[in-house]
Amino acid sequence: KAGVTQTPRYLIKTRGQQVTLSCSPISGHRSVSWYQQTPGQGLQFLFEYFSETQRNKGNFPGRFSGRQFSNSRSEMNVSTLELGDSALYLCASSRRTDFASTGELFFGEGSRLTVL
Amino acid sequence: DAKTTQPNSMESNEEEPVHLPCNHSTISGTDYIHWYRQLPSQGPEYVIHGLTSNVNNRMASLAIAEDRKSSTLILHRATLRDAAVYYCILRDTYTGTASKLTFGTGTRLQVTL
């Protein structure tokens, strides 16, 4: 069974640019969530999508956005990049109903973004 | 979100058991106790979870205090591949925020020969 796939694995951008990261969840998983990991702040929740709808959002500015497609694949976008956006961006998928999640989250290996 | 407290780091010898403690004094009745670990250069990986009773799986055991204010992750025989950061997380599975895991700083486990 294929795991969670994130692309690209590594990328370098400059301040002011925008970036789009992609996540393909495990087949059959309808929930995709995104996390940012930095040395200073650790792992922080960005947002969760289920059935193409954002269900939860973390405490991040509006420059961070995402979407989910009908096949459950998800993308996140960061506009007007800042140096502090340099981080490992992790995607996780899980089975989910409208009312609850069952079982664990399965994380991808992440996309490492460096902003110069 | 209810918070957890873990030691910053622990060391173990290979082939010996490891007990990783977690305090969660403000846990609510619907919070499940989850453990994840993150190996170097990888995303977090689920280890185990439980609500009230002790739990066992192929990776580890979870011992939950009777008052649920603390728990212990037990690796029965640590190997070098178990060197990772271990996160204890409280997760309210049934409120719709279940995918919003709140990671603390975790415990960095070092395993030596």
Image (tube, coloured by chain):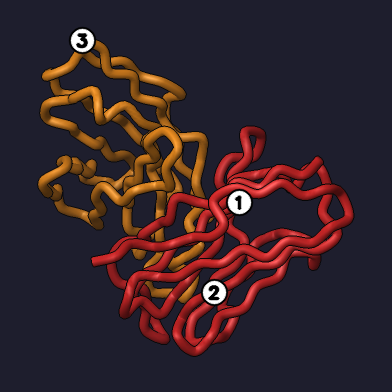
Chain colours: A red, B orange
Query: As shown in the figure, which amino acid type bears the numbered disc 2?
Result: Ser
Left or right for B74, reference A78: left
Residue A112 appears at what percent x and percent y? 60, 46
User: A51 or B107: nearer the eye?
Assistant: A51
Which chain hosts label 3?
B
Residue A55 picture quarter: bottom right
Which residue is under mark 3?
A: B113
Residue A68 picture quarter: bottom right
**Quadrant containing the N terminus of chain A in the rendered view:** bottom left
Q: Which mark is residue A36?
A: 1
Query: As shown in the figure, which amino acid type bears the numbered disc 3?
Result: Leu
Residue B40 appears at what percent x and percent y? 42, 33
Q: Does B96 sit above or below residue B73?
A: below
Q: Residues within 10 Å of mark 2 (few under 14, many from 20)?
A: many
Q: Earlier in the sequence, mark 1 or mark 2?
A: 1
Q: Is disc 1 on the same chain as disc 3? A: no
Local secondary structure at mark 1: strand
Residue A83 picture quarter: top right
Q: CA distance from mark 3 to mark 1?
A: 33 Å
Left or right for A70, reference B77: right
Q: Residues within 10 Å of mark 3 (few under 14, many from 20)?
A: few
Query: As shown in the figure, which amino acid type bears the numbered disc 1?
Result: Gln
Q: Which mark is residue A56?
A: none
Q: CA distance from mark 3 to mark 2?
A: 42 Å
Camera-side mark, 1 or 2: 2
Local secondary structure at mark 3: loop
Q: CA distance from mark 1 to mark 2?
A: 15 Å
**Quadrant containing the C terminus of chain A in the rendered view:** top right
User: A17 or B93: nearer the eye?
Assistant: A17
Residue A46 appears at what percent x and percent y? 62, 61
Which residue is under mark 2?
A: A74
User: B5 or A5: nearer the eye?
Assistant: A5
